[in-house]
Structures are given as structure tokens and as C-alpha cells.
Image (cartoon, rainbow, N blue to C red):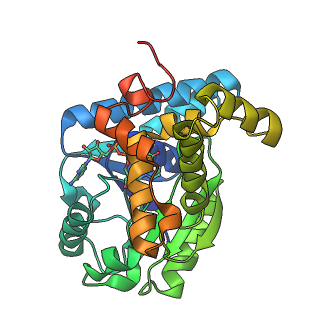
Amino acid sequence: MKIEKIGVIGAGTMGNGIAQCFAVAGFAVVMQDLSAAALERGRAAIETSLARQVKKGALTEAEAADALSRITTATELTTMADRDLVVEAIVERLEVKTQVLKQLDAICGAQTILASNTSSISLTQIAAASAHPGRVIGMHFFNPVAMMQLIEIIRALQTTDEVAQAVTEVARAIGKSPHASSDSYGFVVNRLLVPFINEAINCVHEGVATPQDVDAMMKLGANHPMGPLALGDLIGLDVVLNIMETLCQGFDDPKYRPSPLLKQMVHAGWLGRKTGKGFFDYPG
Ligand code: NAI
């Protein structure tokens, strides 16, 4: 299966980063979103990220300009018709993802690979919505996409060997490290990372230590580059809660119970960096 033309659906945090990575590696990319405004924000984020890479010496000015010229944008999903691989990075809701997948079934040829960047939804459930479920697979990128090396490759029960192999190869072709996970709740990274953040929140909830001390201890004692509470604030505490609920319900195991303080923080609208307040304050 030859992958040359890429489609990315969703121009948000993940979608614009994914489009950028493919374009830098030489692939022609169409980035699609619902509105021109969302596409403009996505393109502006790519420009900023490319400029940062030029400043760091990772790219020349010409390479950055070439990468940008390989990305076209569109509001119509029909622009996905001639794509070899479409990566979906839209809102984390099963019904929205399956609706888009069904539209893609009607637009794309049966050979087009349809990958989802979902962080918690079952790929097997997503694939079941497609008329060609064997071509559906998970490509789970990490934030910030330009910096993070890993792509978790998640096969749905229905995914064919050819599709898994093609997607693994294209991940390497864009300079990432693909690693396989089965279609299990939270896959590997979130299953380990998010309960760790949740337990740090429990330490604060139980008065074991202050947020400052919890984070300082994990940085100084475990050599983590960032404390778990600052990391939770970065990911978004609503996202952390959502993943804990997925793990708790999926495995039907109380060891994944969300911290009561995590729930309260989300109810208060203190979601971390994006709202200016989480376990730490982010003025401005
Ligand atoms: P986001 O909210 O930043 O961007 C989503 C974009 O999709 C928005 O621009 C929105 O307008 C667009 N969109 C929504 N419905 C659409 C539709 N029907 N057709 C076309 N575009 C549509 O979301 P983000 O953070 O980029 O997340 C996207 C996906 O990536 C989710 O599945 C999320 O779970 C996953 N993910 C997120 C990570 C993160 O750190 N934010 C990390 C790894 C995966």
C-alpha cells in the first residue's frame, strides 16, 4: 500500500501538528476543518511552530517554506477523495468520529487508510462504523506533535496486516517511533500516565503534601522533567478526568477511580493552563 497523499481532519491542537509533521517529511497534505477560522488558526500555529524550528536550527528557512507550501486547507470533506491516508483528529466523541467515518466511506476509495488519533475511544468500535473496517486503525500522536517521538499504533480487531504495516512504515518515514498497542482502554501511555497524575491529585486531596511539594518531589526524586500536577494542568484536568472515567468503566476496576478533588476541580472550571487556573496559576 503506497502512501503519498495525506489528509488530516481537524486543524486543532493535534491536527495542525500532524499536518505539519507530514509536510516537513515531504508529503502533500490537505488539512480539513469545519470553518475557515479554524483552518486559519491551524495554519498560524503551523507557521509559529515552523519558525521555532528554524530558530533552533532544525530546519532552514527554505525547508520551512517548502513544508508550508505542501499544506492546503479545505472546509469540504470531499477533498479527501484522492488521499492514501486520512488521519482524523476531531473532537473526542464516538458519535462524531463515526459520523465522519461514514462520510469518508462514501467519499474515499476502499484502499484509503482511515486512521484515528483518538486518545481513549475503542478503535474496534470506531472501525465497526465503516463499510471497510479492515482499513481503520489508530495512530495516536502526542502533544506537542512536532516534538514528541512516539506514535502508538493501535489495531482494531478488524484492522488488516497490510494496513498496520503501511501505517507503521509511514510513521517511520516522518521520523517518529511507532510502537504497537492492542485496542485496550487508555492503550499504554495513558493507562500508565493518567493514573499517576490522579494519584498525585489524591496526595493533595488527602493533605499528604502541597501541589508544589508533590511536583518538586517527583522532579527531584524520580528525575521527571515536569511534576505530575503541572502535567495534568498542561493536558487539561477535564481530559484527565475523562480518561480516568474511561479506564474505571472500561476495566470495571475501582483502582482507576477518579480522585474526588479532580472531579471538584473540573466542576469549578479550573481545568489547568487553558483556563488560567488548575493546581497552579497561569496569569494571562
Ligand atoms: P481540538 O479541540 O484542539 O481540535 C479539534 C478540531 O476538530 C477543531 O478545530 C474542530 O473545529 C474540529 N472538528 C470538530 N468536528 C469536526 C468535524 N466533524 N469535521 C472536521 N473538523 C472537526 O482537539 P485536539 O486536542 O486536537 O484533539 C483531537 C483528537 O486528538 C481527539 O480525539 C483527542 O482525544 C486526541 N488527542 C489529543 C491530545 C491532546 O493533548 N490534546 C493528545 C493525543 C490525542
* Occupied quadrant, residue 273: top left
- Identify the residue shown where x is 18% and y is 39%: 35
The vertical placement of 159 against 57, above or below, is below
Instruction: Name, please, the residue furthest toward the front.
Output: 207
Is residue 179 positioned above or below 212 on the image? below
Horizontal relation, residue 5 to residue 181: left or right: left
Image spot of residue 99 (x, y percent) = 18, 67
Q: Is residue 237 above or below residue 116?
A: above
Q: Residue at x 58, y 73 (%)?
A: 181
Looking at the picture, how far across and down is residue 231, in whole percent? 57, 38
Q: Residue at x 26, y 36 (%)?
A: 38
Q: Quadrant of the C terminus?
A: top left
Expressed as whole percent of the image width and height from the top left, the position of residue 72 reads 34, 43
Q: Position of residue 17 (x, y in %)?
A: 47, 42
From the viewer's side, name the closer residue of 49 and 78: 49
Relative vertical location of residue 83 with respect to residue 105 in this rendering, above or below: above
